[in-house]
Image (spheres, grey):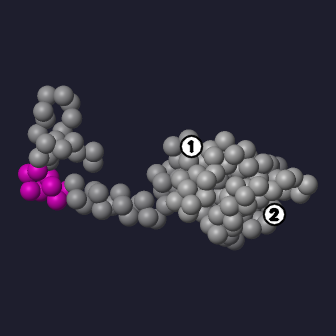
Amino acid sequence: MRGEYSTRQKRELLKFLKEHELENFSLDEVVLRLRERGASVGRSTAYRYLEALAEQGSVRKYAGAQGITQYQSVAEEGDCSRHFHMLCKRCGTLQHVDCALMESLARHVAEHHGFRLDARETMLVGVCARCARLDELEGQARAEREDRGEEGQANGDGADTIDGRHDCL
C-alpha cells in the first residue's frame, strides 16, 4: 500500500500471502498460520490489512462454504477479471476456471440475453473433486457397515450410534 507506514506485522502478512498465492484462508486461519511461524499479528490488524488489500485488488474476498469470509492473494489485479471461479460448498476452496466453454457461455449470455457477466464476481458453486471423492468413500463405508448389519441402533435420543459413537454419516 503506497504512502502508508509499513509495520513488521503488515510485512509478515504480505509475505505470507505472497507465499500462499491463490490459496484460501479465513481471517482466523491467517492469524493462526502467522503465529505458527512466530509472527505476532493481532486479529484486528490482520483484518484491517486484509480488508485494505481486498479493496485495493491484491486480495480476493468472498464468502466461503459456511458463510465465513475467505481471503485469497492474487498475482495481479486484473487476473480475476479474465476467468470465472468455482467454489466448493463443502470445503470452501475457490478455484479459477480458465476454460473456452466458460468464455463461450459469457459470449452467449451477452449476445442472446443482453447481459454482460462480470468474471470477477461470477462463481459456480458445487463440490470439488476432493470432496466428491470423500463423499464417495463415506458412502462406501456406510454401505459396508449396513452390509455387516452395523447400521446402528437407536438409543432413544433420535441419534443412531455404533459402538456408543454418534454416526454422522
> Is residue 73 in view from this perspective?
no
- The residue shown at (11%, 39%) is 153
- The residue shown at (46%, 51%) is 90
Where is residue 4? Give x, y as percent.
87, 52
In the image, residue 45 lies in the stretch drawn in magenta: no
- The residue shown at (81%, 56%) is 6
Instruction: Look at the picture and state if 146 lies above or below 18.
Output: above
User: In the depicted view, which residue is nearer to us: 102 or 80?
Assistant: 80
Which residue is under mark 1? 68
Where is residue 144? Give x, y as percent.
16, 59
Structural distance between the alpha carbons of marks 1 and 2? 25 Å
Where is residue 85? Give x, y as percent.
65, 59
Q: Secondary structure at mark 2?
A: loop
Instruction: Look at the picture and state if 129 lies above or below 9.
Output: below
Between disc 1 and disc 2, whose residue precedes?
1
| In the image: residue 56, left or right of residue 43 | right
Where is residue 87? Give x, y as percent.
57, 55
Q: Which residues are magenta?
A: 143-150
Mark 2: few/some/many CA within 10 Å (<14, 14-19, 20+): few
- The residue shown at (62%, 44%) is 43
Identify residue type, mark 2: Gly
| In the image: residue 86, left or right of residue 139 | right
Which residue is under mark 2? 78
For residue 132, which numbered disc appears in the image?
none
Residue 20 quadrant: bottom right
Between circles 1 and 2, the one closer to the viewer is 1
The overriding secondary structure of the stretch rendered in magenta is: helix
User: In the depicted view, which residue is nearer to us: 42 or 113?
Assistant: 42
> Is residue 16 in view from this perspective?
yes
Identify residue type, mark 1: Ile
Q: Secondary structure at mark 1?
A: loop
